[in-house]
Image (spheres, grey):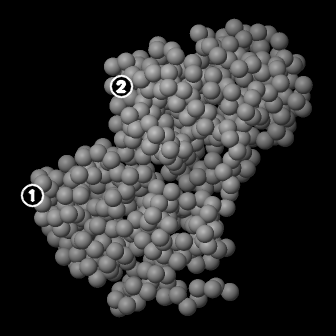
Amino acid sequence: MNKHQDYLLNKISSPQDLKKLNLTDLEKLAAEIRTLILEKDAVIGGHLGPDLGIVEATIAYHYVFNAPQDKIIWDVSHQTYPHKMLTGRAQAWLDPEHYQDVSPYSSPDESPYDYYTVGHTSTSIALATGMAKARDLSGGHENIMALIGDGSLTGGLAYEGLNNAAIEKHNLVIVINDNQWSIDQNVGGLVTALKKLRDSNGQTAENPFTALGFDYRYVAEGNNIKSLIEAFRAVKDVDHPIVLHINTLKGKGYQPAIAEEEAHHWVAPFDLTNDQPLQKNPATPTVNSVILDVIIQQINNGKQVMAIDAAIPGVFDLENFKKDYPDNYTDVGIAEQESVAFAAGFAKEGGIPILLENSTFLQRAFDQLSHDVAANDLPVVMLVAGGGISNQSKTHLGIFDQVMISNLPNWVYLAPTNLAEEKAMLLWALKQRNHPIAIKLPVNDVPQTPQQNQKVIVDYDQINYQINWGKDVAVLALGDFYSLGKSIADQLGATLVNPLAANILDYQSLDILAQKHQIIITLEDNILDGGFGQKVAAYLGPKNISVLNYGQKRVYTDQTPINETYLQNHLTVEQILQDLKTV
């Protein structure tokens, strides 16, 4: 039985039903939505603080505007849980059996009320501006709105969008959801500008939005449904671009999320009675503790080291580090382009930059990885987390970093198979000053020390494969897939190879392997096209050797269970062994 059967939300199948409610009902609905967000996130995890803070604005929007004819583009879209509940998808919160039915981000495949598959930041204003121009040319009159905030304004594309939105000839509303946070605390001059607007109730003369030419409105109580309804009614159908700045409280309705905003931006499953995560912290050492130990050692040795991240200190467990070593830490906000260019400048002046990036977000900085770092061959050191096949939304896949980075000139992309190797790679990367070096951090559980007969490499003047000799078949298993390769090699009595790098081949070893074996297998936790395996196959093409490449096909998976993706790509031991019988 649905324990929430008395909820008003059960009667809301579309925004049209919302318009029948009075203010008291709307406030009751807001409380219901918060309860459901907390209950679901406690069970399966998800974005918590952003969604709790946007409830009233979502209700007010759908109460005033006429979606889907009127259009709202949600920046990042990690705050769309209330929107989804009000647009026919409430069952995914009301009934635990349906918790996995919807994407945690906006998705046109789910609903006509969603206009884009969006999961990264700062795109909403540019998207809305293009939509407004198309509407103008077709003679339409619908309202078009971009809702941006929760850190998204620190991304460069947000400013590019604002620059062009300011000269739109007709209706375009930009809602600034100002909750004073991103994933971590907001950084930079934007903090000062928004604070001056809040402190003056929107009246300060130092208004960056009016300076650009926008009509500017301010709502001090951004979690007050009545105030928001009035504000939205005032901007509806206005025939020029407007910035509507609303002051909201991230995490509203759940005190732990208000007290610790960063920790509750996104949460793993937790106990609602005490706010404690259900999964215990892993024992040390970890992938992150190895990194921190090396960085701190470098600082203590007097090295000019700078740890740089883009609003994701929690991904790398940097909370204590940034307090203890503030002069050696820079958070640029949600702006990966800035982080990479910043690192290039730091390296040019003789500093040692250590970039800490998340695979799925790094693609925003491709131009900087190529033009600013690679073309200038600067010794930037970059650590990439979250790279590999996952069960994430297609907006947050980590399967592109390896191909993206390793196919740029000058970059060396290393892939450790254990923690000792990770440390050795990082120390070497920091010592050398010739090329940019990236390290693909392990995502799966890896051993602390090398496995039997495996050496820890401490120098990379040239890549020398680590080889445990067997016969007939050679298995080249990169990084996280070394354990998969070991399972295959053990069953076959095959040769097992740790290639160390995704893009620098050991040609001498490949020649010998081709001479001594009938088949070579490559394994990589990434997409195949343009990957490590194809580089090996291209080199060995003229030789009399069969090469089988295993990785993920060049497709977007979307919340697909990892085991299912492995099966679809023949990435199980049983499938690979069966494939070998047909070669």
**Residue 360 rendering spot, x and y as whole percentages:** 51, 43
| Residue 508 vertical placement versus 222 (above, below) | above
Find disc 1 in the rendering and name its residue.
205
Residue occupying the point 71% across, 13% down: 510
Quarter of the figure with the N terminus: bottom right
Instruction: Give whichever of 105, 114 is nearer the camera.
Output: 105
Instruction: Give whichever of 252, 375 is nearer the camera.
Output: 252
Based on the displayed image, in which of its 4 quarters is residue 128 positioned? bottom left
SS for callout 1: loop
Based on the displayed image, in which of its 4 quarters is residue 294 positioned? top right
Residue occupying the point 71% across, 20% down: 456
Q: Is residue 268 left or right of residue 353?
A: right
The amino acid sitting under disc 2 is: Phe
Is residue 491 visible in this depiction of the protein? yes
Find disc 2 in the rendering and name its residue.
346
Marks 1 and 2, how far apart at CA: 35 Å
Residue occupying the point 33% across, 47% down: 187
Q: Is residue 288 left or right of residue 69?
A: right
| Residue 229 vertical placement versus 337 (above, below) | below
Reading the chain from its start, which is encountered first: label 1 or label 2? 1
Is residue 549 visible in this depiction of the protein? no
Quarter of the figure with the C terminus: top right
Instruction: Give whichever of 357, 482 is nearer the camera.
Output: 357
**Residue 293 rendering spot, x and y as whole percentages:** 58, 32
SS for callout 2: helix
